[in-house]
Amino acid sequence: MRLIFLGAPGAGKGTYAAVLSEQLGITTISTGDILRENVKRDTSLGREAKAFMERGALVPDELVTRMLAERLGEPDVKAGFILDGFPRTLAQAEALGKLLQDKKIALTAAVNIEVPREVLIRRLTGRRSCPACGANYNVNTNLRPKRDEMCDRCGAQLITRSDDRLETIRTRLEVYAESTAPLIDYYRNAGLLRTVAAEGEISAIVDRIRAAVAP
Ligand code: AMP
């Protein structure tokens, strides 16, 4: 199974991708996670990407596409994949099409994860992560940690992603509407679009995604 997850920041793409990739035994490729890892390690890619990410803008297509092409060359991808956060522009969608064509593989579906705007903002402002073990939480949903702002797994103080501040969230939602939402029509025209309403329990949403992408 080869899936793309489309959806605004805060739609829950990463959360559903984590559950689904476990269930299906396929890898999730999150370009946001790869970029954050590069920023943390202070690589040259990280240094180039950092300023764009901090203000909620997109990292240039050329950089992200090169990074994705490398990742798609790794062996674990052969079993299938979920792309979380890529493509985000028409140029990236076209580049992905060419990469897959060269590998003689096709996408199974592009899943459009839909969430009302108020819910997106509530989820984004509540997002926390553990700097020590990488666990994710949300203080505004039922994914809140047991003890206030502390990691359930390792007890570290949770942090807010620097691009989850309200001002940056607004920019990211605007960038989504302008650059990424047009991909919904792009994949609809390709006959690959499946739309899923992402409200309710995580397990129910994942079941809906599975049903929508089943052959
Ligand atoms: P995410 O974790 O998917 O919300 O991504 C966090 C940030 O990384 C975004 O706001 C962008 O700055 C950058 N980013 C991630 N994926 C892409 C992409 N496909 N194209 C451009 N920028 C990206």
Image (cartoon, rainbow, N blue to C red):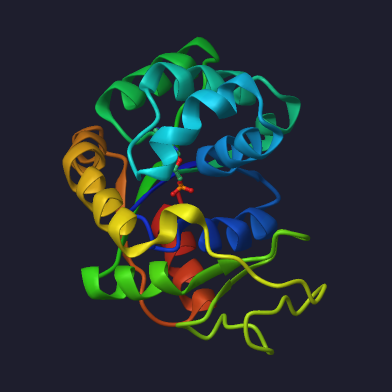
Given residues 155 and 103, the one toward you in this image is: 155
Position of 150 relative to 88 (above/below)? below
Q: Indicate the position of residue 27 as horizontal and vertical percent values.
A: 66, 43
Given residues 78 and 11, the one toward you in this image is: 11
**Residue 4 quadrant:** top left
* Residue 8 seen by the camera: no
Q: Indicate the position of residue 75 as horizontal and vertical percent values.
A: 74, 26
Q: Indicate the position of residue 1 as horizontal and vertical percent values.
A: 55, 42
Left or right of 163: which side holds 26? right
Q: How many marks?
A: 0
Q: State which image quarter holds ligand 1.
A: top left
Q: Indicate the position of residue 68 as horizontal and vertical percent values.
A: 54, 25
**Residue 23 quadrant:** bottom right
Question: Residue at the location (61% across, 58% down)?
Answer: 18
Position of 143 relative to 124 (above/below)? below
* Residue 138 seen by the camera: yes
Left or right of 57: which side holds 126? right
Position of 128 relative to 22 (above/below)? below
Question: Residue at the location (44% across, 63% down)?
Answer: 12
Question: Residue at the location (70% across, 72% down)?
Answer: 157
Residue sticking out furthest to the top: 102
Residue sticking out furthest to the right: 154
Position of 129 relative to 7 (above/below)? below
Question: Residue at the location (72% across, 75% down)?
Answer: 151
